[in-house]
Amino acid sequence: MIKQIQSILYLVVIPLFSIAQDWTEPIIINCNSKNSSSDFIIEINGHLHVVWQNDEDQGNNKIYYSNSIDEGFSWTTPFEIGQDTSYAMGEPQISITSDGDIYVAYVYYYNNIPQNVIYLQKFDGSVWYPPVIISEGMPGSYHPRLVVDQNDRIYCFWFNYNIYYRYIENDQLSAIFQLYSGTNEIFLFNMGVVDSQNTFHCIGLHEYNGQPSSDSLIYFTYENDVWSDYSVVPGGNPWINPHIVLNSFEDPSIVWGRKPEGDFVIFYSTILSKFENGSWSSPEIISENAEESTCAIDANNFYHIVNTEENSPGIYKLVYYYSDNGLWMNEIIEESENYYRNSKLLIHDSTAYLLYLKYNTNDQIVCLILRKQEILTTLNSMKDRKNVSFYPNPFSQKTRICFSLPDSKYCIVQIINIYGEILKEDIVESVGNGKYQYSWDGTNRNEERVISGLYFIKFTKFTTKENILFKVLLIN
């Protein structure tokens, strides 16, 4: 039975605003043909390893590997993994052991999905070993995921209408295990991270067969060779593209996209929830109009999120969000008429690495790109720039907020509930020099009192869309 986890509310306010930071210019890893489905890892020594699917020869997709020993500035000539031209390959995943052995899992397509199998291939730094069939005797398998534990045991998970896995230890392949089972139920393993005590923290999907609306984001652990019961993450239905990360206290947080109500919706709200004091926090809306999200936490427990967004028709953006658990900032890394896919963010030492695919307007060329950024360690100067003040919070009658959006005369104010619905919208004029004051009395656009709960007050600058987002708690 699913264990429901109770949510909690934070009695704090969080301003969100843009601030310029320096990402490197795009470093092109491969841009000669149509690429897709990429993954990368970073060694302890800072070397980078990347794999990707190449779709240039339609119907005969290939998997390529490349690495960099200079922090991503230059890359080796792409190497074709598998080198079998009989059938197509795809969905590559890469991981590494403490001694530097590379493992790549991928799907081998035999004409159609019912014949798919999962392969795993090892690279010891000089030689690629022959591929090994992981999903032996289970045609129709796909969605491989790799996790390496603290003892260098390599786990490969895959989907075949349920979660299955095997592991390699001392070059020996284990039996096949099934994680969960249930009548007319579907389970999918999405991602797992391992803490210093060798406990797996995992997220996945649970669905009752034939009922897509029953999709639930689930969390489960693995410790001492025992799997926990799974629990449903509050607010995780429906979801897309979840990521799980651990802070320095080894507490997990999950970032995912939540689909709003309605058919044919391609944009999602980016949601963050943290596991604190034995339960998941109330889902926190980071942004709207996102297509994909990726997340990382640095050594100071600051959150870093990168979204693919389309705020204007036909204009796509990579947007970077940064927080120290109290103050959110955002900036546009890149924007163009070309859209972005398959982004992944990793942090090594004091540097954030972002890998993504950039599609041209006719989709004939897809470039695999890396960007980097040195991580900031203090927010004091940023807070001072916005002259933020607010009182009271929580509130029952009225809350007053003062802030600055330099070089602006007007801004748009929106009152948003936790579901992303805009309850009220106003245009506010600056009191002078980009300074603003705003009070909210807890009513919607019809001047009706809203119910007690958590709300967001968003201020957006007319010209640049620079914004500040305050989180407030109303108590009637």
Image (tube, rainbow, N blue to C red):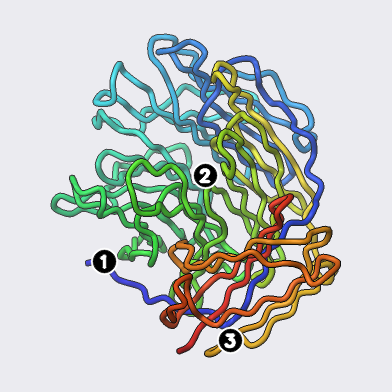
Q: Amino acid at mark 2?
A: Glu
Q: Indicate the position of residue 299 as horizontal and vertical percent values.
A: 70, 62
Residue at 64%, 61% in the rendered image: 412
> What numbered label is drawn on residue 69?
none
Query: Is 265 situated left or right of 380 in this image?
Result: left
Q: Is residue 422 above or below residue 185?
A: below
Residue 2, numbered label: 1
Considering the numbered disc 2 on the image, is that residue within a helix, a strand or a loop?
A: strand
Kindly report the distance in space between the C-alpha atoms of the residues bearing marks 2 and 3.
36 Å
Depth check, front residue: 414 or 302: 414
In this figure, which residue is indicated by the disc labeled 3?
398
Label 1, label 3: how far apart the Cα atoms are:
40 Å
353 left or right of 155 in image? right
Q: Mark 1 or mark 2, which is nearer to you?
A: 2
Callouts 2 and 3 close, C-beta under 8 Å: no
Seen from the viewer's position, the closer of residues 49 and 375 is 375
First-in-chain label (1 vs 3): 1
Tell me which corner region of the image, top left, top right, bottom left or bottom right, holds residue 15: bottom right
As shown in the figure, which amino acid type bears the numbered disc 3? Lys
Residue drawn at (67%, 76%) of the image: 438
Instruction: Mark 2 vs mark 3: give the one in front.
Output: 3
Q: Which residue is mark 2?
A: 292
Residue in view at x 65 percent, y 47 percent: 319
